[in-house]
Amino acid sequence: MRKLNGDNTFKVILGIIAASAAIILIVNAYVLISGSTTAIGKFGFDFFAGKSWNPVTQTFGVLPYVLGTLITAGIALLIGVPLSLGIAIFLVEMSPKAVRVPFSYLVELLAAVPSVIYGLWGLFVLRFWVLDFVEKPLHAYLGWIPIFSGAPFGLDFFTAGIILSIMIIPTVASVTREVISAVPSTIREAAYSIGATKWEVIRHWVLSYGRSGIFGAVILGLGRAVGETMAVTMVIGNAIGPNAMPTSLFQPGQTLPSLIANGFFDSQTALESAAYIGAGLVLLIISLIINILAHVMVTRVLKVKGGAVE
Amino acid sequence: MNTKYTVVIAIVIIAILIGAVAAYIYFSAPAEEAAPVSLTGSGATFPQPFLNATITEYSSIKPNVQINYQGGGSGKGITDFTNRVVDFAGSDAPLTDAQRTAAPNSLHILETVGAITVAYNLPGISSGLKLSGSALADIYLGTITKWNDPTIAMLNSDLTLPNQDIVVVHRSDGSGTTNWFTKYLSLVSSTWSSNVGASTTVEWPVGVGASGNANVAATVTQTENAIGYIELAYALKNSIPVAALQNPAGNFIVPSLDTTTAAAASLPSSGLPSGSDSWANVAILNTSGEQAYPIANPTYLLVYKELNVVPGMTMDKATSLVQYIWYVLHDGQHNAVPLEYATLPSNLVEVGETTLKSITFDGQSVPTQ
């Protein structure tokens, strides 16, 4: 019989700790599925494709909020990722050391700001900047394009997307910065030695060497954008039902997390509670799909070879 | 044994002995006053400041009575009341028939009245906007979209209304305020009643949602051309412009504590249910008084008719509870106006008195004064 020595005990303890991650996910999924069966069983496919969220008639469908979640997260990536890449490249490749260290700390401090603070700032400050300098001009000149139509007043998908883009910057920027700094300097030196400019070195060698790691950083950011609740609830306008179906970026809407945050605690019936839990299940499924897709992208599409930065 | 340890142990033993003696003396001190009584309640947050003021005052009159009202929302109050973990509960919504079955022999006591105001933000118009119920319903239905719509313009011939889209603001969280507001809209508009209905949250046809009175008020005050509904107390404390609403007598009534009391006072006391009946159909909406504001909302205290069903209840506790609520209905009412609650009119005080007198403990009636 094997003796239970220090190493073995340590192994068992770590095994239990590692298993707890899987157990938490399974328990979560189980609770969400068992809690939502009444709602999903009653409405069937309409729960996923329905537009109505009506506590009076007790009909519930999550489609507008799924779209809202994807749209706001999409805006966040569209704006946040280029900014984060710029920050990371500047910090690693361009900035003098005296700037790099304090600036890196500042970027990481952005991640330490609680989301309710972003929400307050969004509600009282950013909303008006977005309204006056972005939404009104866009609406005035490009209002004929459906996504810029409507009557902009600053509490809408667009503002929520902007807030989210700011919130994902610290995550994406600091992970990207680590990835870029891990690119071996021999690669840079080799590139410079064949006469490449700074831009060419970054574009062709540094970014392509680190692309799977950068992609991972983007997915981390996307995960935060999809799940963010407080800040989004404060600026997205919280429309409900068919009124929340996205037709324009400049209209109030909702995401799945904001829907749950707004209504769950005041559910009047068991069916209504089950519908909110079902919305949570859909959110979990979306997050899992994003992560699985990301994993497939990183391993298959980008064909990571041994030695590349993960 | 080491001398150092002996000294330490000796000191510890002496300290424990001194503590024990002190505790014995403290706890065995003879009570100088009536036995202490402690009562717990939970529920609606709307009346909480008012109830807390009456509790503070009451405990200065009866120092042996300790009352703790925890808030937590009407829903929590009803759950705690049904599970009998509190001595009394507060709820803005009356119990439904199903809830009354779950909590048999429950009594409703209406303790104060609030009102729901329609706040607006129109540049250059800081007061004087007038609306009818049907115009308000059409705004929230999205059939009136501009401030200079002929329906609104006709009601406000003295104002120059802008040719701007109305930004409609509603609550995004479940709320008793929404419940009474949508009940009012259902009452004045058959389209609202059939298409949207009334509940603590509804499927709003148009508009932007904000959670909580404060957030709705902030959104309205910050957004030009916005309209939203908020509690009277909140509007008064923050001096937010509010619209005068047309009542059934045809008058445009500015919401205030007086017009809210007037609304409650014009409920016919003969038509009111007794405390043990269902209050589900009682509303202080569109009452008949000349000066009655059309959207007033009651808030209730819930107690059991036979108090011995509450675990831990004694005749002492029952007496204190009944006398405290009696106090809230009478002397305690002077706290209402300073805290922006409407004073209870005499017709409702009388109904409450009758209800309190019907409370028993172990079959014996409980003295109310």
Image (tube, rainbow, N blue to C red):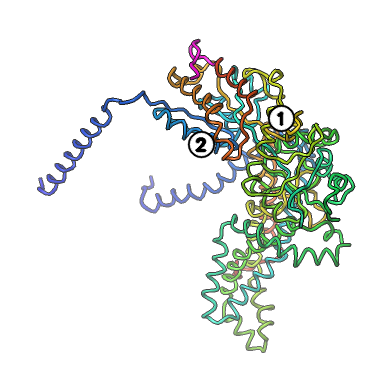
Q: Residue at point 59% right, 29% down?
A: B111
Rendered position, B197 above or below A29: above
In this orientation, which residue lies closer to the viewer: A175 or B356? Answer: B356
Real-space CA distance between mark 1 and mark 2, rounded to the nearest whole angstrom: 25 Å
Q: In this view, does A133 lie to the left or right of B160?
A: left
Residue A183, quarter of the rendered image: bottom right
Q: Residue B53 carries which label?
A: 2
The quarter of the rendered structure image containing the N terminus of chain B is top left
Q: Position of residue B110 (x, y in %)?
A: 62, 27
Q: Position of residue B365 (x, y in %)?
A: 50, 12
Rendered position, B354 above or below A137: above
SS at mark 1 in the image: strand
Rendered position, B121 above or below B335: below
Residue farthest along the top direction in this orientation: B363
Q: Residue at point 69% right, 82% down?
A: A200
Q: What stretch is highlighted in magenta?
A: B358-369
Residue A277, quarter of the rendered image: top right
Q: Residue at point 12% right, 44% down?
A: B6
Q: Could you confirm whether marks 1 and 2 are on the same chain?
A: yes
Q: Position of residue B175 (x, y in %)?
A: 67, 38
Residue B361 falls within the magenta-colored stretch: yes
- Of callouts 1 and 2, which one flags the residue occurring earlier in the amino acid sequence? 2
In this orientation, which residue lies closer to the viewer: A21 or B29? Answer: B29
Q: Mark 1 points at which residue?
A: B284
Rendered position, B101 above or below B46: above
Q: Residue at point 56% right, 57% down?
A: A114
Kindly identify which chain the residue marked by label 1 belongs to: B
Dominant secondary-structure state across the stretch colored magenta: loop
Kindly identify which chain the residue marked by label 2 belongs to: B
- Type of the residue with mark 2: Ala
Residue A83 falls within the magenta-colored stretch: no
- Type of the residue with mark 1: Ile
